[in-house]
Image (cartoon, grey):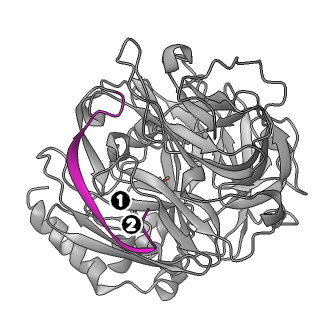
């Protein structure tokens, strides 16, 4: 666990979280990276020191997923958008306010597919006074549960056709097993009988979504992506890449061991979606239970989490009609992804914010052409995402905002009254649509992209230039940011 004012050292290390050893890129020597912990109102000062040694992949850039970066768009970490990458041997201070946001977040490399190689970890901002405090007894670093897909090849070596890649194992709190691999220890989460726990479930996934269950226990969901929701009792949670949930678990079953299961799916069913032999599993252990594997039985879910049943505790949807409406259709040509037929190609050496700083007059003057849209200041924005004909759900994430999911892929109806607010929403399959709304009150260039990293790499993103003429006025750029671009260009003279 590290605090909100900390150093993050990025290094290459050999790791074998599932018993298979490979080179990883990690924060502070561990995978997942340490929990970054803060309290309501804290300012983050995270100094990222790049000590990567892999000659083929030694730049980095870190995104603090879910933070709005109001006034600090330069600290958002998105490659090609908010900053130049940090070359090895350099460091960069991400200095940004939590700005009243509380809840469960995460951080990850936003450069290529680097977080698939290990550079990712959870973040929590604890409330001063949690409106749901009466619902639980325990909420600490031991109640954060991370889910991650893990690959035996480096992400850049994965043979891809743009569609995605097949993970070797699922890691729960950094531990897991692969098919026909050794029976290495699984993560154990300890509870005491009759206590109530606020678990914070964080998907650090690169690709797969997970169906999460704990044998014999119901889960009361109270938060989605840093937004409190009205309590919803479920027995399974399908969680997509980048999403987070808090749920309360009452340890009211008999003292024993229970399987925690996170069964992966990519929409193509290429992963071993079984919990046999401890695949995709961890252990919930009551105090006093033997140090043994559970023999609990999986029962079919009767109360799955359905997104349309999530309603915000605060923050209803923006009222009235949209003043800026747009439809984005996902396309795939067998190699590259596109939105409205344009493939995003990150301008790594000349990020959008640098283009603005050096005098671009409006969004249409920015490169890459056709991928950047102006959003007028103060607009009520309504975005309709038309799912791809390729049968895979795409979890879309918007930087700089949470949004209201007025039409979930799981629903045929529009809800303008009390839809869930979150920052990652999945599309459905076939020609399904997802509709989101937000108010454009945060000037900045914000990327909207599929959180399947292989799809982002192959272009499934657009950038919104929000309140263009206010971007520099509202976001003073520190000298260290300009110096970073110089250091990057020096490190890549022939780029
Ligand atoms: Cu979690 Cu643009 O990312």
The answer to whether residue 477 of the structure is visible from this angle is yes
Q: Position of residue 420 (x, y in %)?
A: 79, 53
Horizontal side of residue 70 vs 248, given as left or right: left
Residue 14 covered by magenta stretch: yes
Per the image, the residue denoted by label 2 is: 352
Secondary element type, mark 1: loop
Please, is residue 32 above or below residue 49 in the view? above
Q: Which mark is residue 57?
A: none
Location of the N terminus by quadrant is: bottom left
- The residue shown at (68%, 20%) is 296
In the image, what residue occupies the spot 35% across and 29% down? 151
Asked whether the residues under the numbered discs 2 and 1 touch, taking CB atoms below 8 Å apart as contact, a structural biologist would say yes
- Pick whichever, 244 or 86, lies toward us: 244
**Quarter occupied by residue 22:** top left
Lateral position of residue 292 relative to residue 59, left or right: right
Label 2 environment density (alpha carbons within 10 Å; few <14, some 14–19, many ≥20): many
């Amino acid at each position: 666990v590290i605090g909100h004012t900390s150093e993050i050292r990025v290094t290459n290390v050999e790791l074998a979280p599932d018993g298979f050893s490979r080179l990883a890129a990690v924060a502070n020597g561990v995978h997942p990276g340490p929990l970054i912990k803060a309290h309501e109102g804290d300012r983050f000062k995270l100094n990222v020191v790049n000590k990567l040694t892999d000659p083929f992949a030694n730049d980095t850039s870190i995104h603090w997923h879910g933070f709005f970066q109001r006034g600090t768009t330069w600290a958002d970490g998105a490659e090609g958008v908010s900053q130049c990458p940090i070359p090895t041997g350099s460091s960069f201070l991400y200095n940004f306010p939590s700005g009243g946001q509380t809840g469960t977040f995460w951080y990850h490399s936003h450069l290529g597919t680097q977080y698939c190689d290990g550079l990712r970890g959870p973040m929590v901002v604890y409330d001063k006074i949690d409106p749901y405090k009466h619902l639980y007894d325990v909420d600490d670093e031991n109640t954060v549960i991370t889910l991650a897909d893990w690959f035996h090849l480096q992400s850049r070596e994965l043979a891809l056709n743009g569609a995605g890649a097949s993970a070797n194992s699922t890691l729960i709190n950094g531990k897991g097993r692969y098919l026909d691999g050794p029976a290495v220890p699984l993560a154990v989460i300890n509870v005491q009988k009759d206590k109530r726990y606020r678990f914070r479930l964080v998907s650090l996934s690169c690709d797969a979504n997970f169906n999460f269950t704990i044998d014999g226990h119901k889960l009361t969901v109270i938060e989605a992506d840093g937004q409190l929701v009205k309590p919803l009792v479920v027995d399974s949670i399908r969680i997509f890449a980048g999403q987070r949930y808090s749920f309360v678990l009452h340890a009211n079953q008999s003292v024993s061991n229970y399987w925690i299961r996170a069964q992966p799916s990519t929409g193509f069913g290429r992963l071993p979606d079984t919990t046999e032999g401890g695949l995709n599993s961890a252990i919930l252990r009551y105090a006093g239970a033997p140090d043994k594997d559970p023999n609990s039985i999986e029962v079919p879910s009767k109360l799955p989490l359905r997104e349309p049943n999530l309603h915000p505790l605060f923050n209803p949807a923006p009222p009235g009609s949209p003043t800026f409406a747009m439809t984005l259709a996902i396309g795939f040509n067998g190699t590259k992804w596109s939105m409205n037929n344009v493939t995003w190609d990150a301008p790594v050496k000349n990020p959008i914010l640098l283009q603005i700083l050096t005098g671009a007059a409006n969004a249409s003057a920015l490169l890459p052409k056709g991928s950047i849209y102006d959003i007028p200041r103060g607009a009520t924005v309504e975005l309709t995402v038309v799912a791809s004909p390729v049968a895979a759900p795409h979890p879309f994430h918007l930087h700089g905002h949470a949004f209201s999911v007025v039409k979930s892929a799981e629903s045929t109806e529009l809800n303008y009254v009390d839809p869930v607010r979150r920052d990652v929403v999945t599309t459905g399959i076939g020609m399904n649509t997802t509709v989101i709304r937000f108010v454009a009150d945060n000037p900045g260039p914000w990327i909207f992209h599929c959180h399947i990293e292989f799809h982002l790499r192959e272009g499934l993103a657009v950038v919104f230039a929000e309140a263009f003429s206010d971007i520099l006025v509202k976001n003073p750029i520190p000298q260290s940011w300009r110096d970073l671009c110089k250091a990057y260009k020096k490190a890549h003279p022939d780029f």
